[in-house]
Image: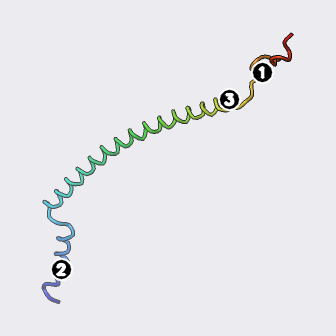
Amino acid sequence: MKIADLFLPIERLIEEHGSAAVQSKHIAFLREQLSVLKEQFALLQAENERLKAENTELKTRNDDLRQQIEKLKQPPATPRWGSNPRIKGRMEP
């Protein structure tokens, strides 16, 4: 076994874990990213709530309009001009 072979696990350990300065930079970067993601999450959550409220309002309006359409499709209970329509020239005295 060579002496260089003894140092391979130590070199790998240093490469994998890096120095303290590199780790602190990585941690700072991750913290920045976390704060940005939290802000984006809050914005998206607020937008989601707004869109849910708008969706509920539009569904209610859609239901109301459908009911109005159904009412317009139904014939009126009484004729529009009364129960005995006059035909000009036939029922006049």
Say whether residue 61 is left or right of residue 82. Answer: left
- Screen quadrant of the N terminus: bottom left
Which amino acid, by three-letter code, is at mark 3? Leu
Q: Give the residue at mark 2.
A: 8
Residue at x 44%, y 39% (from the top left corner): 51
Disc 2 to disc 3, how far (Cα)?
A: 86 Å
Mark with earlier residue (3, 1):
3
Q: Give the residue at mark 3.
A: 72
Residue 60 disc label: none
Which amino acid, by three-letter code, is at mark 1? Pro
Disc 2 to disc 1, how far (Cα)?
A: 100 Å
Q: Nearer the viewer, mark 3 or mark 1?
A: 1
* Residue 42 image-quadrant placement: top left
Percent of width and height locating residue 72: 68, 29
Residue 12 seen in the current view: yes
Disc 3, SS: helix
| Label 1 environment density (alpha carbons within 10 Å; few <14, some 14–19, many ≥20) | few
Mark with earlier residue (2, 3):
2
